[in-house]
Amino acid sequence: MEQLIQDVRYSLRGLRKSPGFTLVAVTTIALGIGVNSTIFSLVNAILLRPLPVYHPEELVDVYGHSSTSDAHETTSYPNFLDYRAQSETLTGLIAYTNFFANLSIQNSSELVVGEIVSDNYFQLLGIQPALGRPFTSDEFGAPGTAPVAILSHPFWQTRFAADSNVLGRTFRLNGLVYTVVGVAPKGFGGMFPAATAQMWIPVTMVEEVEPIGNQRSSSGGQGPGATRLDRRGMNFLWIKGRMRPGDELAVVRAELEGIAARLSAQYPETNALERVRVLLTNDVAVNPDFDNTLAPAGMVLLGAVGLVLLVACANLANMMLARSASRRRELAVRLAIGANPGRLLRQLLTESMILALTGAAAAMLLAYWLAGLVARFQPPLPIDVAFDIAPDWRVMVFTLVAAGVTGIAFGLIPAIRASRPDLVPALRGTADLDAGRKRMGLRGVLVVVQVAVSLALLIAGTLMVRSLGAAARVDFGYDIDRMAYLALAMEMNGYNAEEAGVFIQTATERLRARPDVDAVGLASRIPLSINNNGYGLFIDGRQTSASDRPFIMDGASVDENYFDVLQLRIVAGRGIEPADRDERRRVVVVTEAMANRYWPNETAVGREFRTGWGGRPYQVVGIVQDYKVDTPGESPKPYLHFPLGRHEAFANILVRTATLAPELVPALERELRALDADLVFLQTGTGRDLAAVRLFPIRAGAWLIGAFGALALVLAAVGLYGVIGYSVSQRVREIGIRKALGAESGRVVVMVLRQGMMLVGIGGLIGIVLAAASAQVLSSVLFVGAFDLISFAIAGGTLAAVAFVANWIPAHRASRVDPIITVKAE
């Protein structure tokens, strides 16, 4: 310990004597580790951090699904009640899902997002309200009779001014008066990462709000019942349970699977194919189906930012090599008088670790600042997305581990080389650590690594940026710049189905009368929107029983004007007609992709399929051209168009405008609010807005990877400048003699540039190989080819230009060496 303290003191004295070196080294470490810690904070918040509840390791997720599906989905309320009543391995189960609603407070209206929950929600999670109380069982009796709410802590602060007397206050939700009975504690935002709940209401109020998220009907249909609470086949709730101490997951899983089997036999109409899956809550980030995409994306980001740290380490190793070279006489003297090489090695590593730990402290401050910036950033979604990405103990551990690895990575090899100098030349002051024909040696190798990694990151970022430009030029099949939409949930505005139908009819006629509107139509789903309506299709001749796996397909219910609004061409048959909607005919219009996939070389018009085994068939009456329905980059996909009912409480009004849509959206909103001043929209915007949402992951990736590439390029340029500058300082005598013998300044510049650009060329070739491999990984999200020559050329040219400047500055300084002064010094 005494020797360690001596090493620390000696290192601190040495670093204080070189403030410039210390500042650059600490800054480089802080940047390299800081961006890594920030990205890890984001990954931690989404994938690793457990729910902020009592003993989250005891919780399990219970997913419903059909035996013909591999998905992890929702469960009906009657099934949930049976699971809860019959389970003996769980201390309790809770049910919950999101909802949208129209909030009215003090003559103002807005869209809010909350959770509808079962009676024991807060108790099972171990959440004690900051004010008031949790829900009580008597508030979960008859449907619609308990309009009470518990507010989230941020919502209480912003909308109720953190009033301590908020209990008992009222507000309107979809026109119904709710009473505040509690305020959740700070830091608890519900069960859905990012979609923070603003309030919680009893599940018995579900018919009064608009549930969102995964909603599915069992294969046998929804079953009898007046409301969602009665229909055993209407699956809309997510379930969590708490295991009893000492029980194993396998035991819980077996019990719930047994209960599901009994319910299948007891209620064959709705539950014949119903199954359950049970997973530990801590093993699930968002949903197992979504996690399969989310986790690899997080690893790609961590890999990209890890490369930045690699460049920083290479840069620091170069600096340490140069520093140890300048101290070679001192180290040689210490060895000559009997110092132990191992002690010298430990002392030099101590200096590296001090730099690394100091840089890590600065990195944590940088990570907190960057995390705040990221937290304030909102993607283009209709609801606020909030992740708690403030660094926690996991991030601190990650930072310390990164600091330790960094300190060893950039300090070990320079320390080994410095602790074993060639004594005689070093004592005479005539040796360099990299003496010999290869003047660059290890420092040159490190520069090659920096250049290669920087180029790979630059190319990846350039590919994604060019993909964004290419996506903007994609042929969607319709004009997204002249398409506007207004999403309405009329129940949320206090309308019943009959009133909603009348309002929407009046609204479309009013919009159609505007001179700046070319066409107006209705649809249950807007092209490019993030929600979807999945259907399980049984096509005649393709399946033989209900246990066969259906074809899962997306679709929408549309009116007779939908295809005209999007200017889509009917390839065969006909489109949707008004009579189809009036008589609720079981007809459908399919895309060319569906006709070609399921009826190749045949006539698809007249064919039939069912959306449930044994149900009444739908007949194909028309084929429409393929168009983009999910993402700008998708290949032509099967898509269904059913007739939209006349009295639907939920509908999207689609408008084809005569001019660019963005300028007209506010006017269209005002047109509808002239019919109802308190009208609240789920969402409004243009086709371009929807495309921007779909492209947001690529845009965010382009920004991040591009920023990482730029940072790596700066670090590589600094490293290259340092290596060439150091090389020049070691060759001053040689350059002076060359000039004394008649060498021109230009030739000296070329000589030094050749030395540096050769390293850049070698690193560039390696970087191209790395970039080609990374482009293959990114190919699924690119709108340009993985080997897009323009992207490679732009990134390569940028690197070459920066490298040239980094080389030219020391080369120019070398060309100004005064040969007379150099010779006199000899």
Image (cartoon, rainbow, N blue to C red):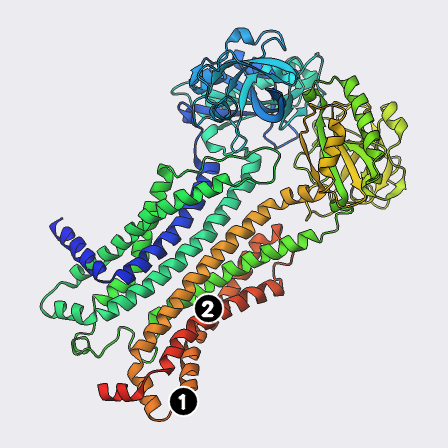
Question: Which corner quadrant holds the C terminus?
Answer: bottom left
Q: Are marks 2 and 1 in contact (CB under 8 Å)?
A: no
Is tag 2's residue or tag 1's residue first in the polypeptide sequence?
A: 1
Say the numbered circle drawn on residue 763.
Answer: 2
Side of 433 relative to 109 (left or right): left
Q: Mark 2, mark 1: which one is toward the viewer?
A: 1
Amino acid type at circle 1 is Glu
- Of 225 and 181, which appears nearest the observer? 181
Residue 78 visible to the viewer:
no
Q: Quadrant of residue 349?
A: bottom left
Where residue 741 appears, x then y in whole percent?
34, 93
Where residue 118 appears, x then y in whole percent?
54, 16
Residue 633 visible to the viewer:
yes
Amino acid type at circle 2 is Gly
Residue drawn at the location 54% of the way across and 64% of the way down:
795
Residue drawn at the location 77% of the way across and 46% of the way down:
479
Side of 483 relative to 36 (left or right): right
Which residue is labeled 1 in the image? 744
**Secondary element type, mark 1:** loop
